[in-house]
């Protein structure tokens, strides 16, 4: 854009403030993905070589932004995975403890069942002895 309004933006320098004569809007694109737009103001019009250089710089900036985003996403996913893994370990330990308790209860029930069967057999034997004595 070479027709820059006077109130659009000012460039600050050691000499003061001045309105640019040229504004370049450069899309930041890498791998066909737009990550932003860079606005560059200048006192001179950009020639084709400048624009080509800025396009390549824009691609590098976009690529760096995408790399940072990807790194942050991978970091987030890794932390989430580690948290889930810890939760699963905790659940596994809790289940192991529950299984041990159930096993102990099962053993106790088996002992009680055996004791009940023994008492039942003794009562049955005693009952048969009493019947035998009564029938005499």
Image: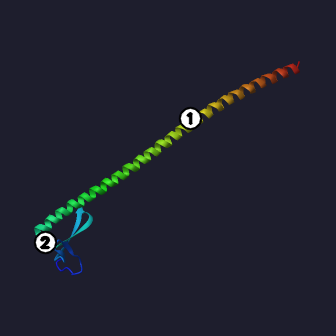
Would residue 97 be found to the left or right of residue 60 on screen? right
Label 2–label 1 contact, CB within 8 A: no
- Image quadrant holding the C terminus, namely top right
Residue 27 badge: none
What residue is at 88 percent from the left and 21 percent from the top? 134
> Is residue 70 or residue 134 the one in the foreground?
70
Would residue 129 be found to the left or right of residue 111 on screen? right
Sequence-first tag of 2 and 1: 2
From the top left corner, tell me how far across and down residue 113 is, in percent: 68, 30
Would residue 12 be found to the left or right of residue 114 on screen? left
Density class for disc 1 (Cα within 10 Å; few <14, some 14-19, many ≥20) is few
What residue is at 18 percent from the left and 71 percent from the top? 13
| Residue named by callout 1 | 100
Q: Secondary structure at mark 1?
A: helix
From the top left corner, tell me how far across and down residue 58 is, in percent: 20, 63
- Image quadrant holding the N terminus, namely bottom left
What residue is at 62 percent from the left and 31 percent from the top? 107
Residue 74 against residue 106 in the figure, above or below: below
Density class for disc 2 (Cα within 10 Å; few <14, some 14-19, many ≥20) is some
| Residue named by callout 2 | 46
Q: Secondary structure at mark 2?
A: loop
From the top left corner, tell me how far across and down residue 76 is, in percent: 37, 52
């Amino acid at each position: 854009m070479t027709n820059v309004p006077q109130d659009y933006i000012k460039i600050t320098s050691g000499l003061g403030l001045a309105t640019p004569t040229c504004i370049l809007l450069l899309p930041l694109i890498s791998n066909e993905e737009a990550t932003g737009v860079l606005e560059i103001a200048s006192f001179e019009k950009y020639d084709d070589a400048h624009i080509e250089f800025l396009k390549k710089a824009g691609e590098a900036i976009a690529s760096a932004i995408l790399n940072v985003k990807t790194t942050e996403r991978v970091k987030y996913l890794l932390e989430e995975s580690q948290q889930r893994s810890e939760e699963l370990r905790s659940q596994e330990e809790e289940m192991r403890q529950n299984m041990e308790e159930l096993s102990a209860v099962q053993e106790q029930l088996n002992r009680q069942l055996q004791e009940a069967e023994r008492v039942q057999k003794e009562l049955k034997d005693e009952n048969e002895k009493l019947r035998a004595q009564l029938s005499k």
